[in-house]
Image (cartoon, rainbow, N blue to C red):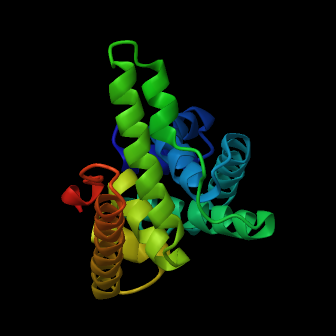
Amino acid sequence: MEEIELIRKVREGDKEAFGALFERYKVQAIRTVYLITGDQYRSEDIVQEAFVKCYLSIHKLRNPEQFRAWFFRILTRLAWRNDVRAKRMVPTEDIMEVMNKKADQISLENIYLQSETQRLLQGEIEKLGSEHQMILILYYYNELSVKEIAKVVGCLEGTVKSRLHTARGQLKKALIARQESKVENGEGEGYEAYRGI
């Protein structure tokens, strides 16, 4: 069923339609909050709270085509507010590490290399300001468009592009510096996690 039709039905009180919206967005929502909080259990609670708030406020949504951006705005605000209270900014453990452990076909070496890459990237993302962290999480982990991110964070599309460009540059610079440091310290050829940035 089309999303606009689901939203229309939810506005009419159809709980099954809301269940369909929940199923459509729950994985992305949990991933987003987890990347902000780093805590699986808090993430689930925050996502549940966001969906309840969404259900209670959906009549305020003026344009049903913008549901995704509207929902992620509610979600990320709740996550950041909760995270500030918990005095944590970015996860210390990594989703990819958990997923890789469950994948039987991936060798232990690949799991180690992938988790090491994710840990390295996550460590550098932690050093970014919250506005740059948010843009990276929404763009890369949730694949939101620049236009959708602008609606989520409440700024112009040009600002999103600028923050994304700045965040990429800062990450690349930090990862190159790490690699050069490893080479100088005789720890091999270093790490090349920056290549995709």
> Outermost residue toward the left?
195
Q: Is residue 181 left or right of residue 45?
A: left
Task: Give residue 155's position: percent from left, percent from top.
Answer: 42, 85
Residue depicted at x 48% and y 75%:
128
Toward the top, the furthest residue is 104
Q: Could one spot residue 70 in this view of the protein?
A: no
Quarter of the view holding residue 67: bottom left
Camera-nearest residue between 158 and 167: 167
Q: Residue at x 28, y 77 (%)?
A: 169
Note whether 141 is above or below 115 in the view shown. below
Residue 70 at what x, y percent from top left? 49, 65
In x, y percent, where is residue 112? 41, 32
Image quarter in which the N terminus is found: top left
Can the viewer see residue 29?
Answer: yes
Where does the image place residue 42, in percent across and percent down from the top left? 73, 47
Image quadrant holding the C terminus, namely bottom left
Q: Residue at x 28, y 86 (%)?
A: 158
Closer to us: 99 or 81: 99
- Find the residue positioned furthest to the front: 186
Q: What residue is rendered at 54% in x and 75% in y?
A: 130
Horizontally, is 106 left or right of 130 in the view? left
